[in-house]
Image (tube, rainbow, N blue to C red):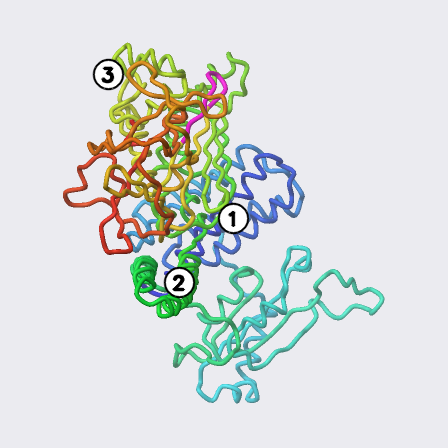
Amino acid sequence: MDELLAQFLIEGPDLVADAHRALEALGRDRADYGALDALFRATHTLKGSVALFDMAPAEQLLHSAETCLESARKHRVALEGAGLEALIAAIDQVDRWIEALGSAGALPPDAAAISGQLIQALSVGEGSVADSPSPQVAEWLAALRARPECLALFPEGVGTAFRYTPDPECFFRGDDPLALIAAVPDLRWLGIVPQGGWPAIDAIDPFRCIVAIEGLSGADADQVRPAFRFVPDQVELAPLDNARRATAPVAGDGRASSLRVDGGKLDRLAREAGELAVAVHSLDGLAGRVERLDRALGADLRRAESAIAQASGAIRATVSNIRLVALGPVLRRMPRLARELAVGLGKDIDFAMTGETTEADKLIADALFEPLLHLVRNAIDHGIEPAAEREAAGKPAKGRVSLTVSVAGDRLVVTLSDDGRGIDPERVRASAVGKGLLSIDDAVALSDAQARRLIFLAGFSTADSISSVSGRGVGMDAVQRAIERLQGTIEVDSTVGSGSTFRISLPVSAITTRLLTVFAGEIVYGVRLDQIVETLRIDVDAVHKVGQGEACVVRDRTIPVIDLGSLLGRPGERGDVVRLIVTEVTGEPVALRVDALGDRLDALVHERAGLLASVPAIGGTSVLADGGVLLVLDLPELLS
């Protein structure tokens, strides 16, 4: 892929996201002129970017949007509802065209027709996409080409002239004209001229830019243009000689460089860093064996192990940091998809999103979109009521759906909330029984919290009919499976008539997983630490028979006790001391009795495959210090 196109496919969606953030702000406050300026700026820049490619319909549409916004800015007129909707539709369409350019390499055949319709909706004549250079600029460019002393600066015959006329209010918009000029590659000559003549000294306003900047660069126009990508409407470029095009970057300019790395190479590096951590862990057992033979040699080996472990930890931390990516590119499509879905269902929603700049491991970011899309679809389809039903319940006609992303410790927390009808546990029980997923007695025995989690069962749905959006009972089941594959958890909280909240917890880093080893019989298993609430050591007399099972009391709360060995078909011997790991199932605590607690370790956990792929309750495999295979248990699946 052409490097310039590849860069655009990264920056273009970011500009669309900037435009949508400004549109959301204007939706809340039509008189937010700061948001209006930000929207104009994003539209300006996006128009300049699409002009570099075969995207004429997009350029024309953005030009019309730009004209509409310029009028609103000049006259400080608040955008009306229809105008705001037309702008949202225009930016959404440009977003679709960027996706089409990336996937198909060209815009769809109907792009010109769609552009014309949206331009009409903006109530702006099609006009000219790009104004002709002003006579002043054209004269200046002609003079430059005629000056021998200027052309003498370019013995290689390649160069670009530019004239940058900053917006007089540029300082208030956060622009730094000199910083932009400093980014021009191979700058060879610079001149500063007044815009409209120099004013008297006492008439100069130090907070307004009154100059234009002219310059000559040894690079070609394609290399100079990115320096002005945020102000494309304020600069004009002209090649001094089109005979040859410069292709090599300018060396030795002292600026920081970046390197794009194939994602597959990063994945391999992450796996190898994890394997290194396992190999270092194996030195612990080896050092213990050596110490029993030679204490001094064992001590030396311990010191070497400590140094290697420290270096390994630093490598793993560096690789983890390299793999961190902002979630913005993953989430940026969500507002548009939510709006399109709402329109298709005849509903009116306000979709808000925060935390797009939050970073997570590339693996987590790549896999997060699909489960979130399922959740958003269910929130709009099942959660948000039709306008008439909402008004009858005393709610605003427009529903609200919000998506928030944050980091808590070493966990990524994603929260999706809506103010819809909520999840009725009685209706969920009845639907599960009706579909044969649960007996009546079992359904009645469930708490409301447990009943709400039935929505994650395969085949479960409360939809009365099958549609293109829902009703087949695969959405929420797919969500839970996707989250579990990422070693995460999902919780649901809901109040009938008020709405629902889904909380997803995922590891920020996906290279290694923190495990606790436990023994059931003579077999050692791994348990993810994020699935353990606490570990306990109590007397055997503190465990009491309750019906067909056992229970203990922890901090005045009765918790069921289940023997892990019996669950796995490997019951162990019982002593005077009971060791427990406490986990949660459907929001309720459950204690698992183990024969012994082992080490805590950072391990590389592989997804279950082959014969293990069909074995329930196995979340993956890892390698012990002695080279043995460690089965990692999935406690929620084991106890479900």
Earlier-in-chain disc, 2 versus 1: 1
Q: Is residue 131 left or right of residue 624?
A: right
Disc 2: which residue: 309
**Residue 497 in magenta?**
yes
Q: Is residue 86 above or below residue 169?
A: above
**Residue 192 in magenta?**
no
Name the residue located 48 percent from the left edge and 55 percent from the top edge. Answer: 47
Amino acid type indicated by mark 2: Ala
Disc 3: which residue: 435
Q: Are marks 2 and 1 in contact (CB under 8 Å)?
A: no
Provide residue 178's location: percent of width, then percent of height: 63, 69
Amino acid type indicated by mark 1: Asp
Residue 265 appears in the rendering: no
> In the figure, residue 279 lies in which quadrant?
bottom left
Front-most of 265 and 246? 265
Q: Is residue 331 above or below residue 564?
A: below
| Quadrant holding the N terminus | bottom left
Picture disc at residue 18 = 1
